[in-house]
Amino acid sequence: MSADTLFNQQAQKHPYYPLDLSLPHYISSSTETPQLLIALAGLATAIIITGFLLSRGQRSFIDRFAFVWFFLCFFTHVGLEGYYVWNNKTLAGKRSFLADIWREYSLSDSRYLSSETCTLSLEAITAVFDGPMCLVVLFSMLRANFATRHLAQLTTSIAQLYGVVMYFSTSFLQNCDSTHPHPYYFWVYFLSMNLPWIIIPSILIVHSWNAITCRINAANQQFKQE
Amino acid sequence: MSADTLFNQQAQKHPYYPLDLSLPHYISSSTETPQLLIALAGLATAIIITGFLLSRGQRSFIDRFAFVWFFLCFFTHVGLEGYYVWNNKTLAGKRSFLADIWREYSLSDSRYLSSETCTLSLEAITAVFDGPMCLVVLFSMLRANFATRHLAQLTTSIAQLYGVVMYFSTSFLQNCDSTHPHPYYFWVYFLSMNLPWIIIPSILIVHSWNAITCRINAANQQFKQE
């Protein structure tokens, strides 16, 4: 018996779609799904509370909301998605909390575990560009630097929106054939977990566009009156 | 002999890579490559000259350059890339000047003719979003609307840059296996024809970012002095 055959026999059958997807290094997670989701929700809540406390200096509701959002996005992009990009080739066979998270999410999109080039490129841009840009927004908010804050908020939100539109578009053009057919994975993981990155960046793009326009127009008005 | 076999025998062998790519509806172009390239260069020159004449009202070199650039981009995104998106499924077998252009370009990237989902999604965003946004930049430049012009220039340039980074990244992650191995196709079509959409949007992002920042900071300074 060759080493390859032995390896294939030892490799676990995986639960991902399409069923013929080759994931020879796959191992199942050691943590149960409810525990994983509770741990992830706990982590997100801790980040949101910390962000909320750090946002005390922000005056309006939208500013405070934006601060918490970019604080959460920073950890998501650099921590969670950065971990994915760094480990994408070996992720299916890794033993770690974040690998368990990605194995669970991949039920809604196996392109993550197979390092599909479009998904990997989108995640790389998100981790390397969007993540650090969140920090630029946060620091410029703390320093009350109006121009940098809104330019960085606009730039980051456009990049986030572009990424999710590409992500959804390529998946739908492939008839979502990398998604597990159980509706839970499509509606809860695939749609609901990505939809915030369509809605909130859209709102923040309009917010920054208007804020910059108003400030410049007010200045023009002021100059004209003098 | 079945209809399918007959069809496959009639279908022309194609010149694209990878060699086993299925393009059953492929027909070769009726125009020779030099004639195609001369016609395309002529068209681009006519657009650039028209854009240059329309840009007379712009004061600085960079503004005039940006005007001509977005004028050219509008026709490229909506005309050339819009035509691709609209006809992508049947393009390999179409008889038209633009289909000939795309068959020629596809030698450097056959993902166009096979309607690969990432390329198609990128082109769809470019045609539907970037193209009309070029018009927003152009009209706001003609109306000397500083805020809208720079916000639209920033937004469009970020989207263009994101698109080309995705395009290059996915191709390199696939070891450029959709590119004809002759260096001409890689260096002239694939690299040189896309590189302007890395370099110029990068310059215009910095330009608009600085322009908006300077205008807002000048206004802040003015308010403080009063």
Image (cartoon, coloured by chain):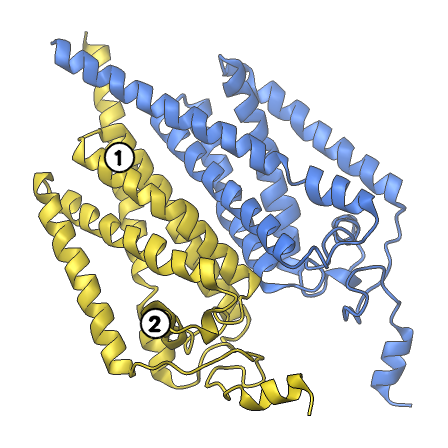
Chain colours: A yellow, B blue
Residue drawn 66% across the image and 26% down it = B48
Label 1 environment density (alpha carbons within 10 Å; few <14, some 14–19, many ≥20):
many
Question: Which amino acid type is marked by label 2?
Answer: Ile
Residue drawn at x 46%, y 58% is: A86
For the residues labelled 1 and 2, the Cα–Cα distance comes to 32 Å
Q: Secondary structure at mark 2?
A: helix
- Quadrant containing the C terminus of chain B is top left
Q: Which mark is residue A101?
A: 2
Where residue A170 sits: x, y (%)? 52, 65
Q: Which mark is residue A149?
A: 1
Of labels 1 and 2, earlier in sequence is 2
- Label 1 is placed on what type of residue? Arg
Q: Horizontally, is B54 left or right of B205 in the view? A: right
Residue A160, given in percent of the width and then of the height, sits at 38, 51
Please determine whether, in this image, residue A167 is positioned above or below residue A129.
Answer: below
Give the chain of mark 1.
Answer: A
**SS for dot 1:** helix
- Residue visible at 77% across and 33% down? B41
Does residue B9 appear left or right of residue B178 in this picture? right
